[in-house]
Amino acid sequence: MKAEIAIIGGTGFESLIEHGEWLRIGTPYGIPPPILVGEIRGRSVAFLSRHGLRHEKPPHRVNYRANIYALHTLGVKRILATNAVGAINPDFRPGDLVIPHDIIDFTKSRQSTFYEGEPVVHIDVSQPFCPEVRAILIEEARKHPVKVHERGVLVCTEGPRFETPAEIEMFRRLGCDIVGMTAAPEAFLARELEICYATVCFVSNMAAGMQARLTVKEVFDVASRVSPVIQQILSDTVWRLPQERHCPCSRVLKDAGLGGETPNR
Ligand code: HPA
């Protein structure tokens, strides 16, 4: 089975896939959750539930390398992701969508590269989210009656706890707009395999210290409210993605001095 595009997201998104077949794929990095491979509007698409089908994996225990490598073995060239985030920038409110353009990685314990040995590889992440995919996501998102932030700096924390108010104040001073727990190292691992990656984030809450307390219930409540809109955006984006890629993602290994070799372990 092959897929050119992948969606990484929450439960419910599997209904986007037509003629789907669930696959179990082993990788040198471990076994990812079952991946649904089928079609969206004639394009071959894989769906992967980041936290597992029963939402059993906390953000710091997700096997990001196995997930991304499995998609790579399917032939995936572009990933459309979704992430729940808290708002640090007071102009961003619960229910808003954000297509971040940059990211700060504040994770601590995750396996964050495929390139552990020789040759030493330094990939360029001057544009960590694919500019081509972002542009289409933004255009499609703007067709909906929902507030869309076309840029934003996402900080990824280790979790699984939410942040303290002092941490959020620090992130605000550093220029972060939104905070989540899952975009890193996912976006970087995709780039290491020359896969385009962009994400539609939804704001589920104001970050710690900006509202009285944080509850998981509000994250899930906002997720179920915005999920139909995000699904429509992703489906329309899949349909509009050009066959050819003209972005930095597709030549990152060449720019890193490699000829598209597979990673050493
Ligand atoms: N912090 C980190 N991750 C999150 C948050 C938050 O406030 N809300 C949803 N995911």
Image (cartoon, rainbow, N blue to C red):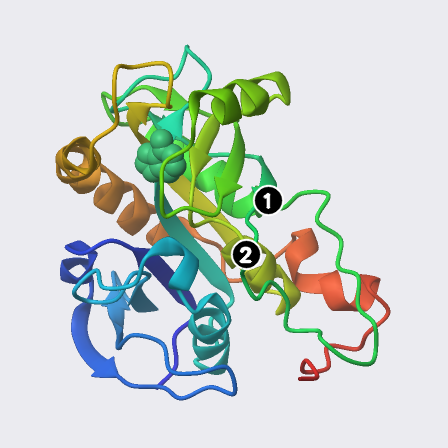
Q: Residue at x 16, y 75 (%)?
A: 19
Residue 56 x %, y %: 23, 64
**In this view, which residue lies farthest toward the right?**
257
Residues packed near mark 1 inside 10 Å, few (<14), some (14 to 19) or many (20 plus): some
Residue beneath the point at 68% across and 80% down: 263
Whether residue 201 is visible: no
Q: Position of residue 90 (x, y in %)?
A: 41, 11
User: Which residue lies at the image location 33% right of the left edge and 61% below the top edge?
Assistant: 50
Q: The residue under label 2 is which amino acid type?
A: Pro
Assess disc 2: are there few (<14), some (14-19) or many (≥20) residues with their C-alpha within 10 Å of its C-alpha: many
Of mark 2 and mark 1, the one earlier in the sequence is 1
Above-or-below relation of 76 to 242: below
Task: Report which quarter residue 122 is drawn in.
Answer: bottom right
What is the secondary structure assignment of the residue under circle 2? loop
**Where on the picture, by quarter, is residue 26?**
bottom left
Confirm or deny contact between disc 2 and disc 1 (CB under 8 A): yes
Q: In what quadrant of the picture does the C terminus appear?
A: bottom right
Q: Quadrant of ligand 1?
A: top left
**Residue type of the residue flagged with mark 1:** Asp
